Amino acid sequence: MRERVAFDLKDAARVIEEKGCTLGAPLEIMDETSSTNDVAKRAAKLGAPHGALWIAESQLAGRGRQGRSWIGVPGESLMFSVLVRLTCPSSRLPLLALASGLAVRDAIARAAPGAQVSVKWPNDVLVGGRKIAGIMVESIDASSKTPALVVGIGVNVFTRVFDGALADRATSVALVATDPPSRVAILADILEGLDRDLSFVAARGLGMVHARITAADALRDRPVQCDDGTEGVARGIDLEGRLRVERSDGRVVTLVAGEVHLLGPGTRASQVLS
């Protein structure tokens, strides 16, 4: 561990161990790297074990969905990747991404009691419509009986000022919590949630967590626009992890992947089936 790593991360191994998780060890903390997901994927190919964890204070090429970057300011963000080796059909890998988003959502809700924390399909976490965390899940050798899944997570924890376009789109735990906990406390809570839910979802699908996903759904019954320009009203996430969108003609389409944008009042879709 290098001296530039903030003091609140230096206790990470002990706090994680006290949770009794199977995730979080071995642990490597880096002051700077290209991307924790890249580091984790290289290690996975070299045989790194289930549960291995990499944390970075700063990323030079951190990636979010749709090619977006997640760089982070040292001491303000929580950026990490955990390696998960589970036996499951490759068709269930997208469900694990949803379950990962739910684990992050639950941890942030505990860190900020009273905040309305939700999951935006497929795996962003919002508070008050603003992004507070993102998840980037990548699989390695998905055809294997025990595929390696890298779950990369970025959480805005202590950031209080966002520049440029992020000013109206992002928030942080410090901005929504009266007494924000340490980054390590949030990390340990996320790992505990992943440890609890991922094995169930891998083995049985979304059934056991579907009610929680539905309750946390940021898009449900709200007007949305899909990547292909289709507008409609989101009607929930089904047991296969697909987003259901009802169009103005009454037809319900299901989305397996892609980006969906919330539409504001006054748009055509906001009046669908009103």
Image (tube, rainbow, N blue to C red):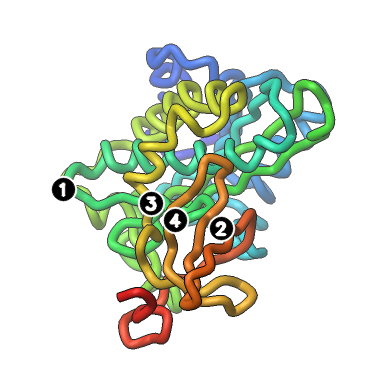
Residue 196, placed above or below residue 108:
above
Q: Which residue is mark 3?
A: 217
Q: Secondary structure at mark 3?
A: loop
Residue depicted at x 38% and y 58%: 220
Q: Which residue is mark 2?
A: 71
Question: Of marks 3 and 4, which one's residue comes earlier in the chain?
Answer: 4
| Image location of residue 64, percent across then percent down | 60, 57
| Image location of residue 262, percent across then percent down | 42, 71
**Residue 116: numbered disc:** none
Q: Secondary structure at mark 1?
A: loop
Question: Of marks 3 and 1, which one's residue comes earlier in the chain?
Answer: 1
Total count of labels: 4
Quadrant in the rendering for residue 233: bottom left
Label 3 Cα neighbours within 10 Å, binned few <14 / some 14-19 / many ≥20: many
Q: State the separation of the CA atoms marked 3 and 4.
A: 6 Å
From the viewer's perspective, is the residue at label 3 or at label 4 nearer?
3
Q: State the separation of the CA atoms marked 3 and 1.
A: 24 Å
| Image location of residue 157, percent across then percent down | 36, 49
Q: State the separation of the CA atoms marked 2 and 1.
A: 26 Å
**Residue 178: numbered disc:** 1
Quadrant in the rendering for residue 45: top right
Amino acid on which disc 1 is placed: Thr
Q: State the separation of the CA atoms marked 4 and 1.
A: 24 Å
From the viewer's perspective, is the residue at label 2 or at label 4 nearer?
4
Residue depicted at x 50% and y 64%: 245
Foreground pick, 140 / 203: 203
Foreground pick, 4 / 115: 115
**Residue 120: numbered disc:** 4
Quadrant in the rendering for residue 164: bottom left
From the viewer's perspective, is the residue at label 3 or at label 1 nearer?
3
Q: Secondary structure at mark 2?
A: loop
Question: Of marks 2 and 4, which one's residue comes earlier in the chain?
Answer: 2
